[in-house]
Image (cartoon, rainbow, N blue to C red):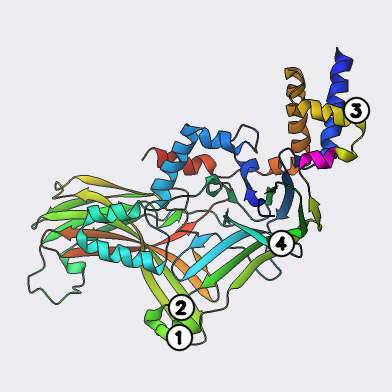
Amino acid sequence: MTNSKFLVTEIFHFRCPLFSTFPSDHEKISKNHSLQDKASTYCHHVYGSCAQPSRQSLQTRRTTRKDGAEERKETFEKLTFPSFFFLLRFSPQDLVTGVIRVRTKGGLSHNGITVNLSGRVTFIMSSKSVGMIESIYSSLKPITLADYTTQVCKSGKLYPLEEHTEHLSTPKRELKKAIEGRKASFFDFFLLSRTFFLSRFHALNAIFSVPIRNFPNAIDPIISF
Amino acid sequence: MLSIQSFLFKQTYDSLTIVDCFTSDGLTELPFEFRLEPLAGQQLQETYHGIYVNVQYLITADLTGSLLGRNLQEVLLFFVECPNAQKLVPAPESFVITPEGIEVTSKKTNKPVPKFKLSGRIDSKTCAITQPFTGHITVDECEVPIKSIELQLLRVETVGSAEGFSKERTEIQNIQIGDGDVPRGFQIDIHMIFPRLFSCRTVQERTYKVEFDVTLVILFEDGRNITENFPVTLVREWGS
């Protein structure tokens, strides 16, 4: 349990036209410098112009305003941008698809894995117009726009691969082991990857029917900055 | 050769389908899928991060631990964009700023208002959020030296409740379009991109409103400034 790491990653990679590699090759993508440069310029110009809009950041912005323009710019550049999925956008009625990855060393027993999608509007009353105490206590109820939960895995145990293959029939297991032990030829690997691609992509066929909106539009003017 | 190929294909395919979502190194992949649609009686809004209004969409994965194990959670933010149904109709506006048309707000200085004339044009007050805000401005005449010409994007957030409503104007971004004492009669282009995270389509709901303003600020070297405000309507077109 202590060794297990629970990760939700690459939720949006399937819809990204920039990623021509196999979707779960997240490392490859992050190594691709040109892509990262693109993303960083995008982030810098679009989101880097101001920090996370919290009260604190607003104050820092106000104090720096007295110092002059150059000081202000420095404070703006502090914003770091987490990942690529910010580049992707969803419209109503789109399919939001992804993969939850659970990395385990040894078995991990659990009482189910659920995924929840939620969208809400939250408010903070301005302390200027309502008063300091009221602004904290009489904060308005958030509006829930969407809230869906599904169970992706029933309670049970997650195994590492070797334990899991035990129930397979012998020839299949042998082949599997051969491939894993890299005893198989390059050709086998090719086929494996191909089938892996195909099986994966068949299962997630619907994702590709979703059109990607304004992706080039959003990128181009910013890079030309 | 072909038969071997198909055999191998079948074999690997079968083994993989049985293994299903389990891959090597104890890595389990569990796919999921949601149709992004609003709850009954609601309408989806665009992702927006403001000071007083926030619209957030999250995907939360929960692993409920067994008796002794602890629970694990991971949260991921994602973006939603909602195109408007109506078509974008450009609403250009020309403006002339003169001392006669301005309102003196500060009473600290007793200096007379300097003579100046600024003219310009905004290509549209109804803007597509994916397209830049464009226009131009010309300093026709100005008797005092100019320090800087800046363009500000402001959010106007209105939140209503039983006690009343609060309406706040706060700055999102500020770009400098003219530095120093700009030449007279020179046409300066206005070009501003709307930031994605901090701007959204103009929202006017029953309990809250999110609107945007673009303000042109002309700073003089003696510290005084002139501001001209343009309320803009942001629209997201279908397929844009």
Q: Which residue is mark 1?
A: A134
Confirm whether residue B119 shows in the render. no
Q: Which residue is mark 2?
A: A125
Identify the residue at horizontal 89%, vertical 37% (top origin): A168
In the displayed structure, does residue A100 sit left or right of residue B171?
right
Q: Rate crowding at label 1 as few (under 14), some (14 to 19) or many (20 or more) other CA atoms within 10 Å.
A: some
- Circle 4 chain: B
Tell me if residue A6 is in the magenta stretch.
no
For this orientation, the residue located farthest to the top is: B1
N-term mark: 1 or 3: 1
Q: Which quadrant holds residue A57?
A: bottom left
Q: Rate crowding at label 2 as few (under 14), some (14 to 19) or many (20 or more) other CA atoms within 10 Å.
A: many
Disc 4 vs disc 2: Cβ atoms closer than 8 Å? no
Q: In the figure, B151 relative to A126: above or below?
A: above
Q: In the figure, A181 relative to B28: above or below?
A: above
Q: Which quadrant holds residue A144?
A: bottom right
Identify the residue at horizontal 59%, vertical 35% (top origin): A19
Q: Which mark is residue A171?
A: 3
Residue type at tag 2: Met
